[in-house]
Amino acid sequence: MKRSKLQTIFEQTILCVIFLFILFPIVWVFLMAFKSRGDILSWPPTFLFEPTFDNFRNILVGGSSGSATGATTVDFLGYFANSLIISCGAILLSILVGVPAAYAIARFQFRGKEDIAFTFLSFRFAPELLVIIPIYIIFQRMGLLDTYFGLIWVYQLITLPMIIWILRGYFEDVSVELEEACRIDGYGEFYVFRKIVLPLVKGGIAASALLAFIFAWNNFIFAMVLGGSDVQPITVGAMQFMTAEALRYGDMAAAIVLAAIPALLLAIYSQKHLIRGLSFGAVKG
């Protein structure tokens, strides 16, 4: 008993150390967002400082961080709006296509079903750099470069496979007998799917949509190569904080903090569905 208690204390201590190690970069970036340039570059690093909102003011209303003369003004709000349009558009399209596709793969038997499902999954295997050149050539010929529609379309390589494979497990956990009982009562396929099945897997839809949104929001390669200055999201626009005059650490940290807010608010808002959805797939029947 004594050995078991000591072992538990040791394991919990190791977990706390790992947690702090993982959390430290996030805390450090958050602190940098409220530091002046002098505090950021001070050595040894300072943890006690006078907070300032200059970095947030610089990226929201324009400024030069008080350091680099002639520093480039970054249209942060424009890039932020582009990220919202592209990510939300990609998720909506993925849900419209992915939910029926996941249900069909989970419920119906047809030739090549597993091959089709594996093909969707294989989109997540291939590195983005491996497919970016062919996609660029295709987009160039179709006139989709530097367009919202083009980026929303190519983001399906990120979001659609995730939604299909996650929701397939949730649909398989829904009792087939329940659907058959509704059909015996005279209800059609679409009514059963919309009124019976979808409410049972709404937690899974929320969980998969949130995870897909985070991946879409954080994408960099597709947006950098296929998107021009008019549609670039914040992940690409943040590169403009690295100028020839200086590295604007404070502005970059403030941009990271603001860019994390949508995913954080979405996770808090859908927390109940997220927890229920992530655990629902592990229970059969």
Image (spheres, rainbow, N blue to C red):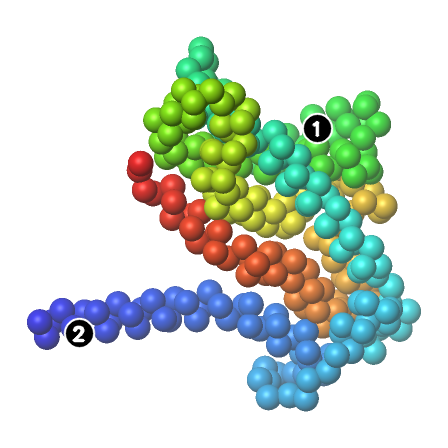
Query: Position of 109 compared to 46: left or right?
Result: left
Foreground residue, 25 or 273? 273
**Amino acid at the residue labelled 2:** Leu
Q: Residue at x 56, y 67 (%)?
A: 26
Residue 6, numbered label: 2
The answer to whether residue 176 shows anywhere in this view is no
Mark in front: 2 vs 1:
2
The image position of residue 187, as x and y in percent, is 49, 23
The answer to whether residue 234 shows anywhere in this view is yes
Res 129 → quadrant: top right
Query: Position of 282 compared to 194: left or right?
Result: left
Q: Which residue is mark 1?
A: 135
Q: Residue furthest top?
A: 111
Q: Residue furthest right?
A: 70
Foreground residue, 282 or 145? 282
77 is higher (above) or lower (below) than 60: above
Marks 2 and 1 close (CB-CB < 8 Å) = no
Q: Residue at x 43, y 26 (%)?
A: 182
Res 5 → quadrant: bottom left
Q: Residue at x 54, y 68 (%)?
A: 25
The image position of residue 272, as x and y in percent, is 48, 56
The image position of residue 125, as x and y in percent, is 51, 33
Mark 2–mark 1 Cα distance, whole angstroms, equals 56 Å
Residue 241, numbered label: none
User: Which corner quadrant holds the N terminus?
Assistant: bottom left
Disc nearer the start of the sequence (2/1):
2
112 is higher (above) or lower (below) than 74: above
**Amino acid at the residue labelled 1:** Ile
Query: Position of 30 compared to 64: left or right?
Result: left
User: Which corner quadrant holds the C terminus?
Assistant: top left
Query: Position of 82 compared to 128: left or right?
Result: right
115 is higher (above) or lower (below) than 265: above
